[in-house]
Amino acid sequence: MVNLPIEYSSKQVTPFGGMSLLKRFVDRLGVREKLNDLTLPEMGSNRSYNPNHIIESFWLSIWTGASRYIHADWLRYDKTLQSIFGWDKTPSQSTFSRFFGKFSQKRNGEVFPELQKWFMEQVEIEGITLDIDSTVITRYGNQEGSAKGYNPQKRGRNSHHPLIAFVSQTRMVANAWMRPGNTADSSNCKSFLEETFEEILKEQKIGLLRADSGFYTEDILSYLENREQNYIIAVRMYPNVKHSIYGLEDWVEISKGIEVNQMRFSHAKRDERRYIIVRKQVDIRPKAGGKLLFEDMPGYRYSTYVTNLDLPLDVIWNIYNQRADCENRIKELKQDFGLENFCMRDFWATEASFRFIMAAYNIMSLFRFFALQSHKRSTLRTIKLYCFALGAWTVNHSNRKVLKIALPVKRRQWMDGVFSQIQNLETPFKFSIA
C-alpha cells in the first residue's frame, strides 16, 4: 500500500463553505436586527464582544457540530468561516460562560418570549397545531435544579425535566422552559401555556393542542376549555377510567385488528367529556402500543384520548398519532443541537443556553422549509453533510474579497438556485405543504 506524502499549508480553508447559504438566509430573515431590540446583558468592557456576536457564534458552533462549550473554541481558528459571517474573531468558551451567567429568571422572561414571538411572526399558518411534550436530560454533576426524578434511561441520576411546545406544521419550537428534574410532566404547565398563548402566540390562531397522558389533569383540561381551545390529550388509565372502558360494547373495527369506541366520562362529578378508546388485537398487531388493562381480556392493548372535537373516532385517533413526530424532534435536538450538554452550574444560565438552542433550531427549520424548499424530515446532520460541508477559501479579486467554494460542476446549478431562492425571500413566509 502506498501512502501519499504529507505537506502543510497556511492557506485559510474552511470545511463549511456552505454556511454562506445560511449566513445570507439569516440576513434575509433579519435576526440580527431583532437581537438588537432585546434586553440582552452587556459584557461591561470596551474589549468585550457585542452580545449579538456572542449569540450568533453560539448558534454557528451548534450548526457546525459543537455539543459543548469547549467545542466552540475551534471556530476561533477558522478565519474563512469568520469572514463569511463578517467577524474578525470569535468568542472563547469562557466568554460564553460569562455571558450566559448574566441571565436571570427576570431577564429570561423578558428576552425569550419576545424572541420566540418574533420567530412565530415570520411564518403565516392558517391554524397552528401545537404539541406539548417534556423530556429528561441527565446531569452528571451538581448543577442547580438537577434532581432525582423520573429518568428511564439513567435511573437514580440527577436530571432536568424541560417542557417544550412544538409547532407541528413547521417543526419549530414555540416555547421551551427548563425545569428541575423532580417535577412532574404537568408541573407549571398551566403557566407555560399562559405564556405560550398570551405572549408568544397571541397573534396566531391555534387550531389544536395535543399532549400525552402526563398532561391529563383537570387543571389543564379546564384551562383549555375556558379558552375554548380544541385539544386531544392522552388519558391516564385510572381505575375509574378502566372500569368504564370495561363495560363498553359495540366496538367498531376500522382496520384489521383495530377497533374504536367512545364514552362520556367525568371524574368526581365534574362535567362529562368525550373519550375515544382504541383497542388493538395483540396477536394481529404484536407491536401495537397501548396498555394491557384486563386480565380476562389479555389479547387487547388499549389507548384512550379525551377531546372536545366533534369528529369521527378514527379521524381523532389519526390526528393524535401525528403527534409522534415530537419524539423525532427531541431526538434531533439532543443528537444534533447539543441539547443535553450545554449546561452550567447556575440554573437560569443553563435555561438561557437551552432557549437559545431552541432559537438555533427555529432558524434551521425556517431554512429547511423556505430556503431549501424541503418538506422532508431532513435533520441538521443530513443538511450539514449535503449542504454546509463544502470546502471554501477567500481570495482578493478586483479589490474585493471573494469566497471560492469547492463544488462539482453538476451541483453548481443547484447551489445557485438556493442562493437565488434566499435572495427572493420575503417575510412573513407563507407556509404550504402543497
Image: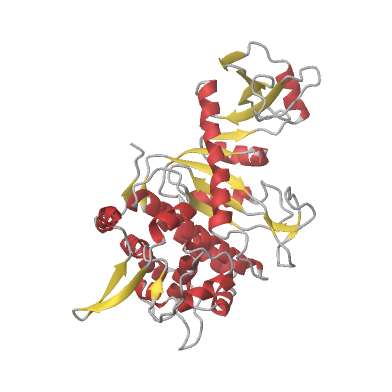
Q: List the single residue furthest toward the front.
A: 1
Q: Give the image's coloring scheme.
A: secondary structure
Tell me if 172 is positioned left or right of 122 in this view: right
**Going 63% across and 54% down the picture, which residue do you hit?**
162
Tell me if 355 is positioned left or right of 13 in this view: right
Above or below, 264 relative to 434: above
**Going 45% across and 61% down the picture, which residue do you hit?**
115
Whether residue 361 is visible here, answered yes or no, is yes
Q: How many labels does the image show?
A: 0
Residue situated in front as seen by the camera: 358 or 163 = 358
Above or below, 357 relative to 224: below
Q: Position of residue 360 (x, y in %)?
A: 47, 60
Above or below, 339 relative to 314: below
Whether residue 39 is visible here, answered yes or no, is no
Q: Position of residue 171 (x, y in %)?
A: 46, 47
Q: List the single residue furthest toward the left.
A: 398
Residue situated in front as seen by the camera: 342 or 231 = 342
Residue situated in front as seen by the camera: 209 or 19 = 19
**Going 64% across and 23% down the picture, which residue do you hit?**
285
Q: List the single residue furthest toward the bottom.
A: 46
On the image, which quarter does residue 400 sit in?
Answer: bottom left
Above or below, 263 relative to 173: above
Q: Where is residue 263 in the image (x, y as percent from the top left)?
A: 64, 20
Query: What is the quadrant of the C terminus in the image?
Result: top left
Q: List the single residue furthest toward the top.
A: 250
Q: Position of residue 361 (x, y in %)?
A: 48, 56
On the image, which quarter does residue 396 sit in?
Answer: bottom left
